[in-house]
Image (cartoon, helix red, strand yellow):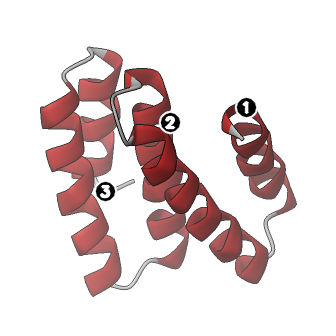
């Protein structure tokens, strides 16, 4: 895991939403620069989970988009368990 991914997850667990989003945004930029396809998908899934937990206006739609992007990546990489987890999250908010 990238350090900012871990920091984002920790901040989300503490319900420090802005800090969490900032860390995850930096982590996604780093994962795209390296590139780390799996980490990109994971960050999107974690960010979607944050948005679902926060539940602010517009979060549901953004979470759906992030989860669909993550699902596409997991499918391309061939990660069936991650596909299941992502589909479960999608069914929660759909």
* Residue for badge 2: 49
Q: Give percent across and percent down for residue 23.
A: 18, 47
| Dot 2 or dot 3, earlier in sequence | 3
Task: Tell me if I can see residue 51 in this picture.
Answer: yes
Horizontal side of 48 relative to 9 (left or right) equals: right
Q: Residue at x 69, y 65 (%)?
A: 71
Count the marks. 3
| Dot 3 or dot 1, earlier in sequence | 3
**Which residue is most to the front?**
57
* Residue for badge 3: 2
- Between marks 2 and 3, how big is the CA–CA gap? 18 Å
Q: Residues within 10 Å of mark 2 (few under 14, many from 20)?
A: many
Q: Give percent across and percent down for residue 11.
A: 23, 26
- Quarter holding the C terminus? top right
Is mark 2 in CB contact (under 8 Å) with mark 1?
no
* Residue for badge 1: 92
Is mark 3 in CB contact (under 8 Å) with mark 1?
no
Task: Tell me if I can see residue 42 in this picture.
Answer: no
Of badges 2 and 3, nearer the viewer stands 2
Secondary structure found at label 2: helix
Horizontal side of 78 relative to 61 (left or right) equals: right
């Amino acid at each position: 895991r990238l350090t900012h991914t871990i920091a984002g997850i920790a901040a989300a667990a503490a319900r420090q939403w802005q800090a969490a989003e900032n860390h995850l945004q930096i982590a996604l930029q780093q994962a795209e620069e390296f590139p780390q396809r799996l980490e990109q998908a994971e960050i999107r899934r974690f960010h979607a989970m944050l948005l679902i937990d926060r539940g602010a206006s517009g979060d549901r739609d953004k979470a759906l988009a992030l989860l669909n992007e993550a699902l596409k990546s997991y499918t391309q990489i061939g990660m069936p368990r991650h596909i299941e987890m992502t589909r479960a999250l999608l069914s929660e908010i759909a």
